[in-house]
Image: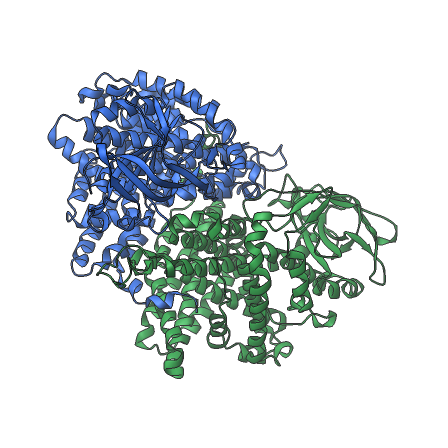
Chain colours: A green, B blue
Amino acid sequence: MASYQAPLRDMRFILDEVFQASQEWSTMPATQELGMDLVEAILEEGARVVQAELFPLNQSGDAEGCHFDKGEVTTPKGFKSAFETLAQGGWWGLGGNPEYDGQGMPKMLTVAFEEMLYAANASFALYPALNTGAALLLDHHASDAIKRLYLPRMYAGEWLGTMCLTEPHCGTDLGLIKTRAVPEEGGTYRITGNKIWITGGEHDMADNIVHLVLAKLPDAPQGSRGISLFLVPKFLVNADGSLGERNALGCGGLEHKMGIKGSATCVMNFDGAQGVLIGEPHQGLATMFTMMNYERLSIGIQGLGLGEVAYQSAMDFARERLQSRAPRGAVAPDKPADPILVHPDVRRMALNVRAWNEGGRAFAAFVASQLDRAKYHPDGEAHAAADDLVALLTPVAKAFLTDRGFDATVEAQQIYGGSGYCVEWGAEQYVRDARIAMVYEGTNGIQAMDLVGRKLFRNQGAYLARFGAAMRADMAGEVPDELDAFHQAGRRELTRLEEVTAGLLDRAVDHPEELGAAAADYLDLLGHVAYAWMWWKMARAAHQGLAVQGPAGADFYRAKLAVGRHFIERMLPRTEALARQIQAGAEPLMALEEEAFYPQ
Amino acid sequence: MASYQAPLRDMRFILDEVFQASQEWSTMPATQELGMDLVEAILEEGARVVQAELFPLNQSGDAEGCHFDKGEVTTPKGFKSAFETLAQGGWWGLGGNPEYDGQGMPKMLTVAFEEMLYAANASFALYPALNTGAALLLDHHASDAIKRLYLPRMYAGEWLGTMCLTEPHCGTDLGLIKTRAVPEEGGTYRITGNKIWITGGEHDMADNIVHLVLAKLPDAPQGSRGISLFLVPKFLVNADGSLGERNALGCGGLEHKMGIKGSATCVMNFDGAQGVLIGEPHQGLATMFTMMNYERLSIGIQGLGLGEVAYQSAMDFARERLQSRAPRGAVAPDKPADPILVHPDVRRMALNVRAWNEGGRAFAAFVASQLDRAKYHPDGEAHAAADDLVALLTPVAKAFLTDRGFDATVEAQQIYGGSGYCVEWGAEQYVRDARIAMVYEGTNGIQAMDLVGRKLFRNQGAYLARFGAAMRADMAGEVPDELDAFHQAGRRELTRLEEVTAGLLDRAVDHPEELGAAAADYLDLLGHVAYAWMWWKMARAAHQGLAVQGPAGADFYRAKLAVGRHFIERMLPRTEALARQIQAGAEPLMALEEEAFYPQ
């Protein structure tokens, strides 16, 4: 009853028509041989395998969950075999470093594939998502010897990586971690401590599990500047890459969660496990951010993928469901009632979901394009500009995509009426699976603090100025009448954002709590403005497509313009409220004594 | 770890200080002997029994769910015994008609008790909620003989009522129902058909189950004007009230749902079951609305109760959780980190939840007061005004309280970070249990259509004019400086609402889809304005309380004013966006062809 077809037409539109990806790739040596033909073939094959192998395991994986027995974890029926099928197709090394058998595909392509993974089976997608991030970290920070041993096997899906940060008493505030690393002869370390909420900490899908663990050295300074990062494999690895003895670590149990039940969320105990330092001592948090930033965008894509599959499933339901008559009278007089999409309020919900999804897909591609430039662009200034935009937009991509992804799943569920609440239709699982994305990899509140603190206040708006300049430059020039509404909206929203920003930076100088008070609304505001930009870009490309391609693609382009218009007129007004809420400042939040929050 | 104490102080404040309930009751013969002393004693005992008997079964009931075996349904462990304990306390007849052994308490009191029931155990609360509505319907529409047989037993919880409307192919559009009623000798009918989503359709908590069933007579006109209502008991009832043979009806299975797992949601099959007509032939939908309107407010209270328990549980977590330091430096330097409520963004979430809850509690009491006037007031004009306000505000109470209740549970869950996603903490259950309230008893989209269609357009804003006049009258007179922000906000929002309304009524004359296009945002807007009024009333009462009661109650009143200020400054700006979205009209929604919604 649930349904999913990867939105290949929209992905092609975004890559080819909105972002001129071939042209973009041609400017960078690492990608210059890549053309849209190959990329389309990859996406088509990716869609086929994801639809055939992963989507059918989504509801069964949720119903069955993972199993824990005496330290061993078994994933739901079918997961292991599907994982191997995709491994054989080379999918787990799609963006990996070619020097170590990765396929070196740009982020603009891999985000599209990731969206398919999350849409088809969010629980399943987390295993490769952690692995890819762990491999990226090793590629950046590990020695060549380690990379040679680990990366080919991780890209092949033989070994899978994890990220071990959280402890029972600390998640956000990692300076409080208690896990210890004691140096031993031979340059290795003994790691001891307890980690919780470790995705894929233990499972049956790979021969080895590669834990990246934050711990403190004996001489560590206090707080977050005293954290180091260690590679701690489940099985020790011999010099030839064969597996040695079992390391002194194990899974103590699984969490029982609201959703993503096919993802093994593990308590991990390290009892003097042998590990290797990655990066510099006491620089573990900075090192870990290579992985964390990857995961943040990836989790944003989780929100997007779930929003898309929720939309498609809801439309499958809406197509068949007949209920009441259209406002101007029957449109299907031969049937007992009209399809529910005749009702303006059902359309409103469907268009909300779709506008979030399509805006989100474009935004993810935009952030990915900046990641590609930051990684590959030969020109120093282009590189630096991309770095700044990535820094600014990573928390937005994580939080805004997941907030809107959750909203999308809830609104899609509403389209079903009572059926959406019943397990068999699948809609409620998307809601439960999407909820976690607002929480893990740094809660969305933490993303918002990162945005207004490190990414805005610390540089006094320099990154935002980059964003504003790029958006304004993209909107310069002649504007056809049909695009005027998009153009005006984009310019108006950018100006509003800049005014709000100036006021906030000003107030925050003497009032440090202003940043935290504004954070969530500010991120929400910036997200809306970024989507307004994306909708401008998409409307322009659709307008051009209509002119160039004629009747053949007209339905697609007209729908794109209509969804965009809904966004501009019926969703974007939210920014007026957000601006006023930010301008209300911190005082209303701080007026109440802490004690007055607690029930008497 | 989850925690619940009924908010008795706030309930007393609302009844006594905001609405002067004693004075209100003294104007109506049916309630004039009721005083706050008795009401407080009832609420205190209600809180005690609900906390002791129902809250401890909330998580276990969710984990266990209901069981179905060969037509029999067993409720979760402890439900039956707790139900009997409360039955012995007389709680199931609290608002019932005293002529038939009910206790005749006014709605202003019973909504407060209902809030406790839903907060403590939403699944459990549904059994008495359906029963109370069914009894109300019988009290209004059944013969004296039936009332004498059924009502005392329903008030005593010996027999429990249900509402059988939905069929597999129709929920909203009840004109499509296929269940048939064939008259037989003796004035009874034989009912045949299948009903789904019947809350408490079968269970082990009562000796008999009293189904109120919509069905069509052989000569029924087409559509919703051809529906009749029948009383169809599980066991036939002899003239002396003893139980006769089993009726020809049964439970075909239970739904597997996202939440409210302790509530038995039944497929019910009627196979020529014997029933009695209630009300007039073909007037069944109108008759059923007596029950439905009751349930709509009751389900609104479900949203409120879950928002309250979610708040309290999140604050229990926040009190213990130490993470990072306050914006101006440590406030608990002796501890490893500060309590998370030092962070403005955590306060923002907590204040949002609390402002929705406290505004909702006042709004529910206000609607209840109008229901009491409509039922009991001796003055014809007061009666008529109350009738209009009840008609206008019932869909708002159902939809706005449940939308905000769901938001509240989601935002409360966010305060926990990752713990909120783990089952053991209870926060995720509140989200799952709150989600259904936006769907059943008429989806919130249907409530919005009822509001803009029947309650606004049909009378060209006459009910809304009543609302505006009452709100404006309540805000007349001298305003102390400290209340100026509340006063200005209320007046501004009311004026905006009236302008938006005039524009909508105007556009809808020639464009019928304008109503549906505006519906959800209009309901949201009216809800915000109603809460702004409630916050004005509460701020005024708190201001007076500070003056009269001095230091003793000062903490409570100051907190009330601070929460209200947060609502005015940081939540109410949403209305600007809603107004603009309504004014954007239907055209953006209707531009897309139906076919273009469906995935290709």
Image quadrant in which you'd find residue B244 = top left
Image quadrant in which you'd find residue A386 = bottom right
Q: Is residue B509 visible?
A: yes
Image quadrant in which you'd find residue B367 = top left
Q: Is residue A266 visible?
A: no
Q: Quadrant of the N terminus of chain B?
A: top right
Give the residue at x 60% y 69%.
A374
Which residue, as the protein is rendered here, is positioned at the far right? A185
- The percent position of residue B415, horizontal first and vertical second, equals 51, 41
- The percent position of residue A14, horizontal first and vertical second, equals 48, 72
Q: Please state which of residues A534 and A268 is positioned toward the viewer in this rendering.
A: A268
Which residue, as the protein is rendered here, is positioned at the far front? B185
Note whether B8 is above or below A293 in the view shown.
above
Give the residue at x 18% y 52%.
B502
Note whether B406 is above or below B38 in the view shown.
below
| Numbered-mark total | 0
Is A504 left, or right, of A365 in this rendering?
A: left
Note whether A110 is above or below B327 in the view shown.
below
- The percent position of residue A437, horizontal first and vertical second, equals 54, 52
Is A259 left, or right, of A68 in this rendering?
A: left
Which residue, as the protein is rendered here, is positioned at the far left? B380
